[in-house]
Image (cartoon, rainbow, N blue to C red):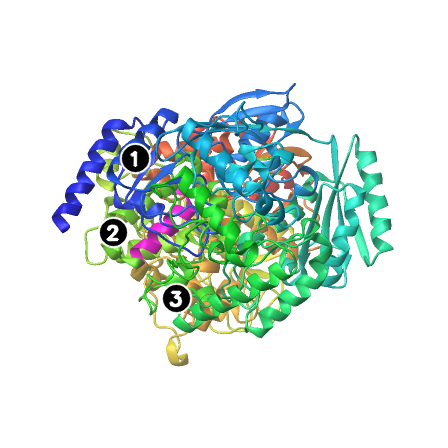
Amino acid sequence: MADRTETEKRDLAKELAAAVRGEVSFAAADRALMTMDASNYRRVPRAVVAPRDAEDVAAALRVCREHGVPVVPRGGGTSIAGQATGVGVVLDFTRHMRRIVSLDPAARTAVVQPGVILDDLRAAAGAHGLTFGPDPSTHSRCTLGGMIGNNSCGSHSVAWGTTADSVRELELLTYGGERVRAGRGTDPTGAPTGLPPRLRDGVKALVDGELALLRTGYPDLPRRISGYALDALLPEKGTDLARALTGSEGTLGVLTEAAVRLVETPAARVLAVLAYPDESAAAEAAHTLLPHGPMTVEGMAADLVGDAAGLPKGGAWLFVEMGGASPGEAAARAQALCRAAAADGSTDHTVVTDPAGQRALWRIREDASGTATRLSDGSEAWPGWEDCAVPPAQLGPYLRDFRALLTQHGLRGTPYGHFGDGCIHIRIDFDLLTAPGIRRFRDFSYDLGELVVSYGGSLSGEHGDGQARAELLPKMYGPELVRVFEQFKSLWDPAAGLNPGMLVRPARLDENLRFEVLPSRPVPVEFGYPHDNGDFSAAVRRCVGVAKCRNTATGPGSTDVMCPSFRATGEEQHSTRGRARLLHEMLAGEVITDGWRSPEVHDALDLCLSCKGCRSDCPVGVDMATYKAEFLHHHYEGRVRPAAHYSMGRLPQWLHAAAPLAPALNVLARTPLAAVAKRLGGIAAERPIPALATETFARWWWRRRRGTAGGAGGLSGGGTVTGTGELSGGRTTAGAGSPSDARTVILWPDTFTNHLSPEVGRAAVRVLEAAGLRPLLPPTAPLRQPGGALPQPALPRLHRPPLCCGLTYVSTGQLDRARRVMRRTVEVLSPLLQDGHPLVVLEPSCAAALRTDLPELLADDPRAAQLACSVRTFAQALEELAPDWQPPRIDRPVAGQTHCHQHAVLGDAAERRLRERAGLTGQLSGGCCGLAGNFGFERGHYDVSVACAEDQLLPAVRESAPGTEILADGFSCRTQLDQLSDRPGRHLAEVLADALGEGA
């Protein structure tokens, strides 16, 4: 039997490869990437095909039909009901079939292929003042094909309806190979137009035989998405076959092209945020706002929003967008709406006219599909009842009953969503890992299905039925209409080859759960994973598949970093979601079978820049940089590592040893010997070797401080300044210039500043002192030995290993070494930090390592958490300790990039405020410079590194006006600019130090 299966697999692979011009893959990695969408479900496909055009689709269908293999059409993979998962051949339309075929502004229509990203269509239409009306929160990565398959809606449906309202014509291929051009109207026989004879006769007979049931069996509400929309085939509704097929979830035909309607966008938009005492009050008020002609009426409660800035005081809010021909008209309409709302229960309001302010608030709503997967106490929450809808006027009482049902079943969740359409989104803390929890999930689903139907609602109000809700369709429609659905499916797909198990004749809603394949016990790991209770499986399953990491657009004001490697390659395996999926499958062991030794996971992580962008930009806080370090540690355990791990992964120790030889090494780096060194060290041939400092920052510090050790700059109470200008000795008493002085800051001599850019350290010292602060370097050995003994005679400074944050060891997965250097750092710094002195770190990547990697690798040492809390950036230290200091006015525009680690871990609010006070105007770009420490220097990464820089950083610098200050606080960012542009970047400390003047 096994031999026969392998033979059939080889035959299928051979015939698909011969018939299809696009990519055909049976590889484990490609199959693993397609096992899940954004739902609770998982299925393992046999193969993945990326068709180039409709003829490729036809060829793939023919081969699959001959082999009896099912086919699953797939767009962005953001479906929440499981309909983008399947066991047959997945057709991935996002690789090639993503062309806007035509756009007619006069007719307000566009013709698109199924893989077109919604935001790409909106951008093309926006040039003509038009847009595509439906706009789900995944608009930056969902595809038109997926939207048509699910009948997606989005926040503007109160104005522009669902996708079905925007579809004009569909071109499809059935599993049997028949071509369908579905539109509106009938042919001379009275059958829907565009059907081949078999389907034409069958569809007409089915509709004619069930007219009464089709006229009475559907609830009347704006968000009725569940089931097949066969009522659209009624004569009085225009016999609209395109509308009937929209929302069929790829179970009837494979979409190859669509003609869609575009709508005119208002010239101006204003956002009114209305506050209410609680969620029920907001829900009851939502439908009363519809007569005012809003474009959106979105609802959120405090348990989802938290302490977000910019919201009026309340317990729940309605986000209501008003349009107008001018900003004044839009604002006037918004104010009128607010007055009406105040008379009907709103307790407060704010009107946001600033586009940036509106984007910030809308981001809260758009990220909710991810943020709602973690409750306030860190508990996991899951979809499954993500989008049921009721008549809008019934939303208030329905929500109260819904909350009561959650309590009855001992469940929790945070409802939000399209209150104006009566559609509620929620993630619920189902236990989908144990048998009792899964039974509760099933029981709750049945009870909630009955509750929704009792209010005249729809089981799905946006995302379709898939496997999540299709089992309960008889509750909503009754057995007779469900039987008609099955007949319709059999008519179109008699072989049941298209997306079987979805919508009709579905699998049980508690089968194929994606969690059941994961280990039942935590796997041994190195990091602490504090937000996931130390469980690596829980960390990996944070990824729910909403795929924000697949966003490739950079809109106005965007500062997002995630995910630079996907933006460079466009490959799913190089997205944060793709890597998380591969790690999930590695833990499952079914498709990816080599565990930590997996070459598939290694290859996907190889192009991860460890930028940490996902840590902040992913709505659920996936931290792929940490997962990569964990994987590399296990992958190379007991094995020879790549040369770059020894050269750049251990950079701090090499630079420390090389410091006395810096002049000679700099000369050698400009000779042919450099090519040999790069080859041996695994360094990209295209990369020049950065010059070593001929005087390190620490040595400069010693030279500068040598004459002041016993004077005003010395330490009182038994502390001294050593010959290197470091703190030394025991705990000191407070006094002028003592470590207990509130003006004292511990300045961290990171490897990059110390050995490669000491000018940054010198500038920082100058600015900190000008601000009235006293920077001091830490010692290189503990002040006291364990047990309180006095320190032993120290080795000469040259022979002591340098203090280190461990960054390069972490990024290359050398976690044992990282832990050793981190423990030494904690031993040395802990006594100095007990008085609350901040640890000022000039290099953002080192600051991020000390803030996050160090406490997560030393989870057993409480001093590690204390050290992490003491870390401050240069700007944060100035703001906290010298709030009244006025920086020099520079009055010049800036360009450049916020360091990715700073964006992700530390935040840049203090930097922005400091720049503003210094008259440095403008905004830095998002993204990642692409060098990312060792990444861009490693052999094989150069092209991707350059592509990442070309995404945002280099264009921003090239487009900046002459005289613009190019800011880059990270050594990697400055190096990338030095090597790829003619506009060098500088640390903010350097810019301020230059402006201080000679007398400072």
Query: 922 or 133: which is nearer to us?
Result: 133
Query: 69 or 973: which is nearer to us?
Result: 69
- Element under label 1? loop
Where residue 684 is drawn, which disc sits there? Answer: 1
Question: What residue span does the magenta drawing correspond to?
Answer: 574-587
Which of labels 2 and 1 is toward the front?
Answer: 2
Residue wearing tag 2: 598
Amino acid type, label 2: Ser
Query: 637 or 918: which is nearer to us?
Result: 637
Q: Is residue 861 above or below residue 282?
A: below
Crowding around mark 3 (Cα neighbors within 10 Å: few <14, some 14 to 19, many 20+) is some
Query: 152 or 827: which is nearer to us?
Result: 152
Is residue 984 visible in the rendered structure shown here?
no
Do residues under tags 3 and 1 come within 8 Å of each other at their CB atoms? no
Point out residue 886 in the picture as x, y percentages from the top left corner: 71, 48
Dot 2 or dot 1: first in sequence order is 2
Q: Is residue 535 above or below residue 752?
A: below
Amino acid type, label 3: Asp
Q: Residue furthest left?
A: 3
Q: Marks 2 and 1, Cα distance to the nearest angstrom? A: 25 Å
- Measuring 56% from the left and 52% from the top, which residue is drawn there? 460
Q: Is residue 582 magenta?
A: yes
Q: In the picture provided, is 47 more to the left or to the right than 859?
A: left
Q: Marks 2 and 3, Cα distance to the nearest angstrom? A: 20 Å
Crowding around mark 2 (Cα neighbors within 10 Å: few <14, some 14 to 19, many 20+) is some
Amino acid type, label 1: Ala
Point out residue 433 in the picture as x, y percentages from the top left corner: 40, 67
Residue wearing tag 3: 535
Do residues under tags 2 and 1 come within 8 Å of each other at their CB atoms? no
